[in-house]
Image (cartoon, grey):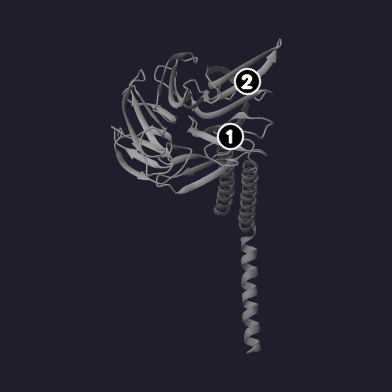
């Protein structure tokens, strides 16, 4: 009776272990599949005669994306020459499909460098307006890209707008560079009210060329400026500290680390923790030159980048969506990681089968194996005594 109970309990134990393991694998696999983050890459426009560049991307409240940069199209029709060029605003759906575009006509040198969705559902853009000299350009639109107002800031020399954010008081903070104020080219920080009227401005520099490429209001009400230098200010724009750290666009992430978009021959994406230690970096690009100018963390924890690509036969805007580890669909490392994961899963299954087999053999052959082991020990001792 006791033997029957023991046999039943051991068998039931092995079965239970196997079922728990098998079900846990199914649950984990299903969860991983459900939490798969979106990854894709889209080229916007790319038709003959069109030159389009994306300098900044922002995820919108409807889950789509808005891109600002420049647009240039030249064509002939009916014996006449036609030209459309200037700063542009492009809206896409959540999967990067084109919805609409607005071009703010001026000259080929006019560009939008930064765009943010505002609290009223519209958009604020900063960039460069070219007249007798270049000036910082600030444009406010409604929710479908129609211009509501625009204004410029500048002096006698060239000045450039690179980044804009809406501030907690409803106004705007703009970062860029100025040759009109200070010595040489300096970082320029401009604070405006909700209508674009300047409230104050500050100039930062250490000689040579410095450009403020990104600006963000910090939780203490001050501002952090990225570019050729990293500058931290108080709420009135007074310098608190400055460090020699460079990047095209720097954003704080949900885990208090930073995501940095860089440019070279390929697009670079770098992730650090809160102290600036690198966690990973990724490269994107084709056979031509590809440059990344802007990065944002998306609602699903991944990242979206925009830039310019020359790898598709022309000069085109590029929009890349990655997962939280910085991978997109075309990145071969994704497939290597997937194959390694499958290999590890296969090894885990094999190890589990071996363990179950050993437990089964011990259950049914424990007594014979014990007798054989005792006999072997006795034979060994007998031979040792005889030889001694």
In the rendered image, the vertical position of residue 48 relative to residue 329, given as above or below? above
Indicate the quadrant where residue 168 lies: top left
Q: Secondary structure at mark 1?
A: helix
Cα separation between marks 2 and 1 = 43 Å
Q: Position of residue 214 (x, y in %)?
A: 43, 34
Q: Quadrant of the C terminus?
A: bottom right
Q: Residues within 10 Å of mark 2 (few under 14, many from 20)?
A: some
Residue drawn where x is 48% and y is 38% of the image: 248
- Between 270 and 352, the one lying in front of the other is 270
- Between 88 and 257, the one lying in front of the other is 88
Residue for badge 1: 33
Q: Position of residue 183 (x, y in %)?
A: 37, 39
In the rendered image, the vertical position of residue 327 relative to residue 364, given as above or below? above
Q: Residues within 10 Å of mark 1 (few under 14, many from 20)?
A: few
Decide which of tag 2 and tag 1 comes sooner along the chain: 1
Q: Position of residue 356 (x, y in %)?
A: 62, 52
Number of marks:
2
Q: Position of residue 386 (x, y in %)?
A: 65, 87
Which disc, if any, is residue 129? none
Relative placement, left or right, of 256 versus 107 is left
Residue drawn where x is 62% and y is 33% of the image: 309
In the rendered image, the vertical position of residue 214 relative to residue 275, given as above or below? above
Residue drawn where x is 57% and y is 36% of the image: 291
* Disc 2 + disc 1, Cβ < 8 Å: no
Viewer-nearest of labels 2 and 1? 2
Indicate the quadrant where residue 355 lies: bottom right
Asked whether residue 39 is in view, the answer is: no
Relative placement, left or right, of 192 versus 14 is left
Q: Secondary structure at mark 2?
A: strand
Indicate the quadrant where residue 305 lies: top right
Asked whether residue 136 is in view, the answer is: yes
Which disc, if any, is residue 73? 2
């Amino acid at each position: 009776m006791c033997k029957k109970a023991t046999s039943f309990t051991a068998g039931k134990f092995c079965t239970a272990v196997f079922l728990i393991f098998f079900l846990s694998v199914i649950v984990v696999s299903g969860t991983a599949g459900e939490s798969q983050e979106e990854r894709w890459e889209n080229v916007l426009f790319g038709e003959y005669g069109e030159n389009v560049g994306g300098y900044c991307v922002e995820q919108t409240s409807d889950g789509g994306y808005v891109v600002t940069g420049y647009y240039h199209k030249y064509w002939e029709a009916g014996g006449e020459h036609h030209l459309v060029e200037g700063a542009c605003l492009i809206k896409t759906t959540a999967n990067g499909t084109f919805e609409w575009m607005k071009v703010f006509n001026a000259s080929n040198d006019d560009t939008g460098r930064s765009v943010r969705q505002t609290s009223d559902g519209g958009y604020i853009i900063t960039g460069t307006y070219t007249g007798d000299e270049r000036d910082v350009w600030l444009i406010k639109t409604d929710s479908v890209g129609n211009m509501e107002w625009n204004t410029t800031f500048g002096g006698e020399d060239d000045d450039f707008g690179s980044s804009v954010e809406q501030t907690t008081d409803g106004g705007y903070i703009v970062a860029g560079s100025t040759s009109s104020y200070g010595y040489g080219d300096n970082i320029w920080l401009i604070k405006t009210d909700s209508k674009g009227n300047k409230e104050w401005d500050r100039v930062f520099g250490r000689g040579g060329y410095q450009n403020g490429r990104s600006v963000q209001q910090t939780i203490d009400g001050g501002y952090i400026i990225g570019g050729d230098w990293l500058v931290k200010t108080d709420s009135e724009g007074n310098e608190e500290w400055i460090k020699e750290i460079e990047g095209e666009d720097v954003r704080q992430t949900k885990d208090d680390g930073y995501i940095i978009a860089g440019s070279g021959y390929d697009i670079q994406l770098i992730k650090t923790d809160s102290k600036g230690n690198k966690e990973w970096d990724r490269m994107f690009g084709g056979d031509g030159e590809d440059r990344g100018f802007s990065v944002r963390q998306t609602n699903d924890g991944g990242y979206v980048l925009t830039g310019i690509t020359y790898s598709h036969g022309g000069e085109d805007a590029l929009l890349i969506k990655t997962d939280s580890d910085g991978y997109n669909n075309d990145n071969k490392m994704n497939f290597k990681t997937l194959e390694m994961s499958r290999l590890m899963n296969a090894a885990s299954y094999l190890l589990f089968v071996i363990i179950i087999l050993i437990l089964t053999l011990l259950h049914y052959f424990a007594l014979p194996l014990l007798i054989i082991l005792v006999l072997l020990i006795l034979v060994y001792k007998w031979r040792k005594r005889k030889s001694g």
